[in-house]
Image (cartoon, grey):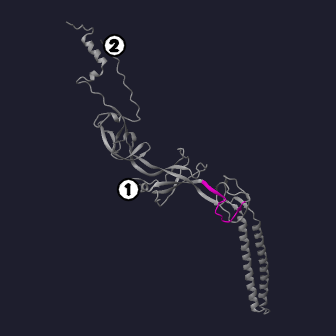
Amino acid sequence: MLTRAPSRFPQPLLFLLILAAYPDARAQQPGGPSPPPPAVTVVTLKAETVTLTRELPGRTNPYLVAEVRPQVSGIIQRQLFTEGKMVRAGQPLYQLDDETYQADVNSAKASLARAQAKLEAARLTAKRASELVKANAVSQQENEDATAALRQAEADVKVSQAAVDSAGVVLKRARIAAPIDGRIGKSSVTQGALVTANQTAPLATIQQLDPIYIDLTQSSSEILQIRKEVAAGNLASTANLPVTILLEDGSEYAQRGRLAFSEVTVDPSTGTTAIRVIVPNPKDVLLPGMYVRAVVSTGQRKDALLAPQSGITRDPKGNASALVVNAEDKVEARPVKVSRTVGDQWLVEEGLKAEDRVIVEGVMKVKPGMPVKATEAGAPPAVPVTPPAPDSAQK
């Protein structure tokens, strides 16, 4: 017959050792203390004024473009500019062979001098005739003929003067000047080349880059929606707010732009309309043809609510919802409607109100109706309380 060996520990001490080895055993005892509510992190929503923006793609275009073409024909004698440099309006760019045009000016001046001499003779003749007719020394017809000759001589002088002016204009055009301020590109001709008046191929192109245009495209449906919201009073117009420019590498351009105009027609092939932004470009950072993005303000919403993206979840059907800690510190599920993102937050349209506490951390360990211990995001952590050390003398 087997007998149980006597235990080396008294029964009360054995029970204490079991509790020490299995701390959850006490909690599992009927009538034991309940576990503390789970801790969650919340964000309290605040009503604020939010400027809504839209990032649109675009291309840079010069503010002014002038293609330099000759207005007279001739051989290029000299190129008077440096390619790629800044030029000023009126600055000479090319000098054509102008000997023929100079000869035309000299000929016109000679004709003018001859006409002026004839005018002087006609003036003297008319003066004498007017005196002699008083004494009946010449007939009235001769006096009238002398006066008519004077008027014709005066007209001949004006015609000759116009010929001198015209020849001077042609001579001046033999020296081709810049029509605008800007940066000039490469020359398409060299010294000795023959150019003709009003030819189709430009000699060079001048572009004014400060300021510079950025042409954007925006969906017509989006523009229509914005106009409806402005008309309904949900949005305030922000047409005068500056426009932020993002470069190809993602960096932000130092200068701010402003809206110049919006096109009144829609491209039927793309369903978009054009928006033009004008931007200062003092250091020529923006060059024509560059791809950029512009952050354009579409409107300003007053008393708007922004909820963190981590506090908004969606079901398989795409319906959005949020878990909110109510006044009794219990979890409450709320169906919500959000429209767009603003930074790392959602713009809330329906389902939430100001002062609601939305759970952003600990969502997976709670469910509706469960009591929780809420801590505001960004609040300093609570200082842990160290329990008193057990009495070492207790047996």
Is residue 203 found inside the magenta-colored segment of the image?
yes
At mark 2, the secondary structure is loop
- The image quadrant of residue 201 is bottom right
- Residues packed near mark 2 inside 10 Å, few (<14), some (14 to 19) or many (20 plus): few
Q: Give above or below for 236 relative to 308.
A: below
Pointer 1 residue: 232
Is residue 95 found inside the magenta-colored segment of the image?
no
**Which residue is drawn at the image coordinates 56% and 50% (left, top)?**
290
Quadrant containing the C terminus is top left
* CA separation in Å, label 1 and label 2: 75 Å
Pointers 1 and 2 in contact (CB under 8 A)? no
- The image quadrant of residue 310 is top left
| Badge 1 amino acid | Ala
Q: Give above or below for 188 relative to 330.
A: below
**Which residue is drawn at the image coordinates 42% and 47% (left, top)?**
49
Q: Which residues are magenta?
A: 193-209
Name the residue at the left extreme.
1
Return the disc, 1 or 2, that comes first in the chain's sequence: 1
Pointer 2 residue: 392
**Residue 393 location (% of width, % of height):** 32, 11
| Badge 2 amino acid | Ser
**Residue 183 location (% of width, % of height):** 64, 54
**Residue 378 location (% of width, % of height):** 41, 35
- Residues packed near mark 1 inside 10 Å, few (<14), some (14 to 19) or many (20 plus): few
Depth check: give the residue in front, 188 or 82.
Answer: 188
At mark 1, the secondary structure is helix
